[in-house]
Image (spheres, rainbow, N blue to C red):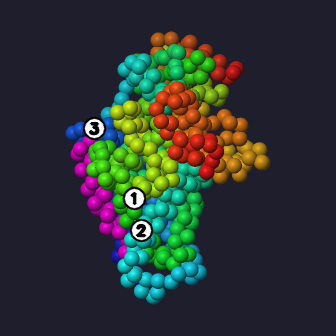
Amino acid sequence: MPEFDPVTYAVPVFVLLVLAEMVWARRKRPHAYEPRDTLTSLAFGLGSTVAGVLFGGAILAAALWIYDYRLFDFGETWWAVWWAWPLAFVLDDLLYYVFHRMAHRVRWFWASHVNHHSSQHYNLSTALRQTWTGFFALSFAFSLPLILLGFHPAMLAIVSGFNLIYQFWIHTEAIGTMPRWFEAVMNTPSHHRVHHATNPRYLDRNYAGVFIVWDRMFGTFEQERPEEETIRYGIVKQLGSFNLLWAVFHEWVGIAQDVWRAPWKHKLSYLLREPGWSHDGSRETSATIRARWEARRGGGAGKPVADENPIAGSGEPA
Amino acid sequence: MEIPPALLQFVGSLVAIVALAGLAWWFNLGPARRLESEDDARREASEAVDGFAPVEVALDRKGRAGLLRDAEGHILLLRQHGTHFAGRVLTRAASARIEGGALVVDTAEKRYGGARLHLDEPSAWVQHIESIKNR
């Protein structure tokens, strides 16, 4: 079984690219970075690797156990089946889309994923702002279908490593748009800026990892429109704190408080419904924020952004 | 004594992180923005709470924070957070007092904290904030 972690080899390149972007920021856009925000984001990245070491063994053991029940068998030398690699990469990216969409629509998953979104900046250090609590959010469960199909866990670990590496460079404002053909197929800085934006128009859009075609196929794509409005980043209720531990655990704390206080019949909903949901309607979800924005802009001025999205259109959770 | 490779990697990463953050500081990246005008405050308010429509605005003299009240009596506190602003709509748990001529607003949200604002009429805002409790 080959042992290869592409991310380990990519880390020095990540550091050099962050450095290069800082030089760009110094000359062109000093507001693109903030030292405390950078420190928090990078500490997130380091902590996530520690979490990976702590929980990785358990996840691998579970994955190998499930692999024994696979439907198809690529044989003893599964790594030599060349076509399995690109197939695994594409299918893994599709499952990443599913995972990512769920991570924004189910609060239990969001509690972990919110870490990646809680910076008000959008730069390459934001890309390294990775969760520490993915294990508890059961992120690994989204790989199970591919393991059961017969893809070896090591193969999936490698292709998802390349997926993660691809997603690094798209976290920047230094690049406007890529050539049209590339924007049509691939996830790009422009598409992913939309994903990190808090503008109502952009909420819960562009979940893609590598291939933006998933969003186009499933009705969650939104084009960046810098000529119409300034993009802003972060979360709907900005943290207002650089405290690393608060940034890591704040949504988990919020869930615990809500479940404790909620009437019994609503407790589970605070785990499983969309972020912002409340049993008394006192809070706002992305759907309600978008609906208010739509109403304010006249209800029909331009193409409603939600009309391609069955989730946002219904106002109900996924 | 042999140092475990994982520990070496961790320490190396930690040094790189501190170096990068130090470089951001050395480059003077992330200069603080200030609320220079009511228009600034309105724009930041709209970004903090989409659609917030203030009818009254008060700015800290140094532009570090602002208070905005809408027609329904909701009060939004904006304060600097790095190179951006972070806002909170004050709840019944919020409080305000005057200390040395400055208005001290406590959101009662521990991690967000509050703000100290130097305003022209702080007592009027104390009343506005206290009135939230009666709503």
- Of residue A149 and residue B91, the one placed in the foreground of this image is A149
Q: What's the magenta bit mostly, secondary-structure-wise?
A: helix
Task: In the rendered view, tell whether residue A42 sits above or below residue A1.
Answer: above
Image coordinates for residue A72, horizontal then vertical, percent: 53, 81
- Measured from the top left, where is residue B98 in percent x and y? 54, 18
Camera-nearest label, 1 or 3: 1
Indicate the position of residue A198 as horizontal and vertical percent values.
47, 39
| Residue topped by disc 1 | A210
Say which quadrant the N terminus of chain B sits in: bottom left
Q: Is residue B21 above or below residue A57?
A: above
First of labels 2, 1 by sequence position? 2
Marks 1 and 3, how far apart at CA:
27 Å
Q: Report which residue position mark 3 lands on.
A: A29
Relative depth, front residue between A315 and B97: A315
Q: Are marks 2 and 3 on the same chain?
A: yes
The disc numbered 3 marks a residue on which chain?
A
Earlier-in-chain disc, 1 versus 3: 3
Q: Which residues are magenta?
A: A3-25
Q: Is residue A317 left or right of residue B45?
A: right
Instruction: Point out the frontmost of discs 2 and 3.
Output: 2
Residue type at the position of mark 1: Val
Write down the chain letter for disc 2.
A
Rendered residue at 65%/22% (across/down): B132
**Residue flagged by tag 2: what amino acid is it?**
Phe
Does the residue at mark 2 contact the one at mark 1 (Cβ under 8 Å)? Answer: yes
The quadrant of the picture occupied by the C terminus of chain B is top right
Dot 1: chain letter: A
For label 2, count other residues whose C-alpha is less than 10 Å away and answer few (under 14), some (14-19) or many (20+).
many
**Which residue position is annotated with label 2?**
A89
Which residue is rendered at x = 46% and y = 32% of the image?
A302
